[in-house]
Amino acid sequence: MKKHIKIVAAVLAGVFILAACGQQPAAPPAPAATPAPAVTPAATPEPVADEEINYPTRDITVVVPWGAGGGTDLTVRSLAEQMQGPLGTNMPILNMGGAGGSIGLQDVFDSARDGYRILGTSMTALATAQVMGLADVSHTEWYAWNSAFTPNAIVVRADSPYETLQDLIDAMAASPGGITMGSAGPGSSAHVGGVIFAENAGVTFNHIPYEGGNAAIIATLGGEVVFNAQLLSELIDHIRSGDLRALATLSDQDVEVIGRDGEVIVIPSAGNYVAPLNSWLPLGGSFGIMVPRDTPAGIVNALSEAYAIAVQTDAFHDFAEDRGMVVVGMDTAQTDQYLANNAARVGWTLYDAGLAPNSPEDFGISRP
């Protein structure tokens, strides 16, 4: 597994402009000097250096807008656990699924700016919410901290007739739109990964959305759908147990997973089968926490400091390695850039494929 983590980290460093985990912002930083290729993030307000704030004095509720047990939920829970100590309070998780993550997102955005109700979600879902018509809130209206990344994996049931990704592609080509794919919902990382895979392979599928990644996995295990492209962090236990067969990952290289009996399970890169896909890889999900941009600076500072400590802990790194993830530890300025790139590249892909009702151009997002 360590080999996998090193591979993905090296790729991410070039593709997503990563930060070293040790970087600790003392205040909400200004956007990067080089403007984002698509959307320029809203300016970060100058915090008051000597601002006095007694925060927190009670529990901080973290709203996860997806069901329990999925990649977002698992990652945000682990991150929140490590932030509790530095903040000196509990951070209970409230799962508020529905409407592709937009119900929980809107709930936090409409809440008081007191730092006691924050959002924990997928960066892709946040970046594409407007284009997908799920929420009228831009990713530029949030301070976000992107903590960890995991690639998509394309899986089928263990008794599936499809032994390789090529088998699945051939079946999809023979029955356009006839093969079902489950996902955590429209615009989720799994949905986006599946769409980009299929577009580059020249095939189509019938998308069946569920309320969260765990529900989509259960549907695959139960035979409701033929395959899914959920995240490796969500699927890894089922791959290890042998209940699901991993046909490929959307990493740029083969991934090794240690099975339940200590055997090495090699999951090939989908780029081995679909050459045009290589320009997109790695694809997957990134997760973290966020608060509305007009949250008082003292609260943002406190969350930033606790987050910077949390992403350096052995516990969070152990969690990430066990789940097939890599800790990226981006601060708010780096996450601004990441979200802008995501909004442009993924938003236009979804729109061009006819899967997003709104043009990114309507929100000032230029083609990448």
Image: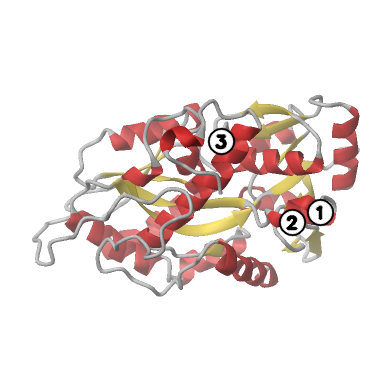
Structure colour scheme: secondary structure
What's the residue at 80%, 58% (across, down)?
268
Is disc 1 surrounded by few (<14), some (14 to 19) or many (20+) residues within 10 Å?
few
Query: Residue 243 at what x, y percent from top left?
Result: 77, 44
Q: Secondary structure at mark 3?
A: loop
Which one is earlier in the sequence, the residue at label 3 or at label 1?
3
Foreground residue among 148 and 217: 148
Q: Which mark is residue 278?
A: 2
Q: Secondary structure at mark 2?
A: helix
Instruction: Please give the residue where the numbered disc 3 appears in the rendered image.
Output: 187
What's the residue at 77%, 31% (across, down)?
204
Residue 47, by quadrant, is bottom left
Q: CA distance from mark 2 to mark 1?
A: 6 Å
Instruction: Please give the residue where the numbered disc 1 appears in the rendered image.
Output: 275
What's the residue at 57%, 47% (across, down)?
345
Is disc 2 surrounded by few (<14), some (14 to 19) or many (20+) residues within 10 Å?
many
The amino acid marked with disc number 2 is: Asn
Q: Is residue 272 visible?
A: yes
Foreground residue among 49 and 162: 49
Of discs 3 and 2, which sits in the foreground?
A: 2
Q: Which mark is residue 328?
A: none
Left or right placement of residue 284 versus residue 17 in this view: right
Q: Is residue 88 visible?
A: no
Query: Residue 242 at what x, y percent from top left?
Result: 79, 49
> Mark 2 near mark 1, Cβ–Cβ under 8 Å?
yes
Task: Please tell me whether residue 280 is drawn above or below residue 347 in the rendered image.
Answer: below
Left or right placement of residue 31 versus residue 207 in this view: left
